[in-house]
Image (cartoon, grey):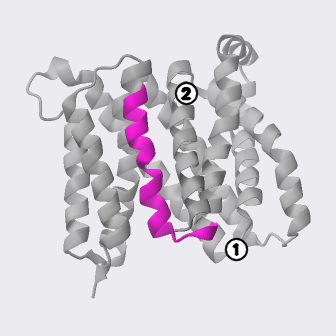
Amino acid sequence: MDSIALILVITGALCHAAWNLLAKKASGGLPFVFLFGVVASTAALPFAVWAWHENPLPLTWLAWAAIAGSALMHAVYSLVLQQGYRNSDFSVVYPLARGTGPLFSVTAAIALLGEMPNQAGWIGILALLAGIFLISGAHRIHRAATERARAGLFWGSLTGLCIAAYTVIDGWAIKVLGLSPLLFYVLCLGLRTVILAPQALRNMPALRTEWLRSRRYIIAVGLLSPLAYLLVLFAVQRAPLSYVAPMRELSMLVGVYLGTRLLREALLPSRLIGTAFMIAGIVALALFSKPSP
């Protein structure tokens, strides 16, 4: 991985942790997701026009299928993530969401494609499972102490499933179809906003209330969210995905730190150790795991 790709990935990871922290502080639902989508689409539109002017490739039906699929999964992802932030701690939901995506991807490869990881791959899977076990608080005996953590386990894992789905679609669009990362993402972003529009616009008072209550967060998330993802897409153009994927998961440690420092969540040793386990598992899967014949 060259220095430019490394800078892109690390900056993207920091932006990703930052916008998730702000989304947690807002704790909005559909109105929040729709409004920051409008901000993001408006801000990114000039860059998409420039990308199209520089490389006016025709958009085939396969390209539009990828755009539609990614937009739908991103819409579901955004709503599920916000629900998780409403019901549990940031330092639980965020690392689980980031860590379970690769786990679901590998599980699908084993179940559907018959691929079997080698020894390093199995170590990675076990590390991810151990991280989930620790972060969710499943090792504790008293139910009352883990109520919010159990909710975080459910919503964080569901978010990870969405991440696995759109990551596969986006990788196929960029790597196989050769779409411009900037144009592809902006089209997905715009279509996601269109998908949410009918339900969001049905309740204009809720939109106005959300804007007045959280406009600082809406604008910040609307700018940081596309920036974080675009930086990773551009990094994928310069470096192998197997190197980019584990590096971007540094955002998990940043997220746990921000959750404890800025949101005053409990810095439980189990959460910190669990996050480290999940990062180690992702590195093992991405860098060392290859299917056995």
Tell me the magenta residue range.
Answer: 237-258
The reply, left or right, for residue 150 in relation to residue 204 is left
The residue closer to the viewer here, 219 or 69, is 219
Of labels 1 and 2, earlier in sequence is: 2
Q: Which mark is residue 23?
A: 2
- Locate residue 222, reporting x and y percent: 69, 34
Q: Most prominent secondary structure in the magenta stretch?
A: helix
Residue marked by disc 1: 178
Q: Which mark is residue 270?
A: none
- Locate residue 139, reporting x and y percent: 12, 35
Is 51 magenta? The answer is: no
The residue closer to the viewer here, 163 or 72, is 163
Q: Residues within 10 Å of mark 1 (few under 14, many from 20)?
A: some
What kind of residue is marked 1?
Gly
Residue at figure coordinates x 75%, y 51% from the top left: 186
Give the farthest residue toward the right.
Answer: 53
The answer to whether residue 199 shows anywhere in this view is no
- Locate residue 14, reporting x and y percent: 53, 41
Q: Gap between marks 1 and 2, in whole Å? A: 32 Å
SS class of the residue under badge 2?
helix
The reply, left or right, for residue 247 in relation to residue 96 is right
